[in-house]
Amino acid sequence: MLMTVNELEKLQAEHPDYRMELVGGEVKIMSPSGYEADEVSTELAAQIRNWVRPRQLGRVTGSSAGFILPNADTRAPDVSFVKAERLRRSPRSFAELAPDLMVEVKSPTDKLTKLRSKIQDFLALGTQVGILIDPEARCVEVYRSGDEAVLLGDGDRLTVPDLLPGWEVAIADLWPLVFE
């Protein structure tokens, strides 16, 4: 049985401990991310938010923020950014648009092919930049619609000049600290 966004919202309210997405009318239960993956996504979200907020460029959210996409799927990237002019006020429920930037961080149970497919789905629906972070391989893949992926490693810096002018972060700074 295919579900609607309203039915997903009711199901989510009945089961608040589960993160869910609606893909092609089917509910997908999302497993919790690994600790390392969540630490990486939190670090990236903090880096972006600390640049975006004082400049009032837009909104940054984590993995709990859902988007009702133009194809009626409801998805939640690990990190997302929406330009201020596209979302002047935070909606109480899901945002009804594709974010300008979306990020997926690979957990130990994730398959890279599925994460890349999710990024391509977002790009096809209007997202400008999709980023895939693989903490295990210590690499970052940056996707833009119609372009080849750009692969970055520890010696590189991540920039998104079309959405976050002047912002950059060293790839090596995304990884969790090791305390001696």
Image: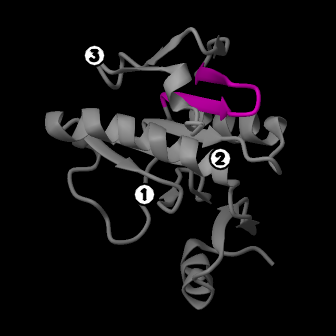
For residue 143, above or below residue 14: above
Instruction: Label 2, secondary structure: give it.
Output: helix
State which tag comes first along the sequence, 3 or 2: 2
Q: Which residue is mark 2?
A: 36
Q: Nearer the viewer, residue 114 or 10?
A: 114
Any part of residue 105 in sight: yes
Give the amino acid at mark 3.
Gly
For residue 74, above or below residue 42: below
For residue 88, above or below residue 16: above
Q: Nearer the viewer, residue 100 or 167?
A: 167
For residue 102, above or below residue 12: above
Snapshot colouring: one colour
Disc number lying in front (3 or 2): 2
State which tag comes first along the sequence, 3 or 1: 1
Q: Quadrant for the C terminus, please.
A: top right
The label number, if any, that marks residue 96 in the structure image: 1
Q: Which residue is mark 3?
A: 166
Marks 3,2: beta carbons within 8 A: no
Mark 3 and mark 1: Cα distance apart in space:
28 Å
Any part of residue 83 in sight: no
Q: Residue 94 location in percent, x, y? A: 44, 65
Q: Residue 19 location in percent, x, y? A: 63, 69
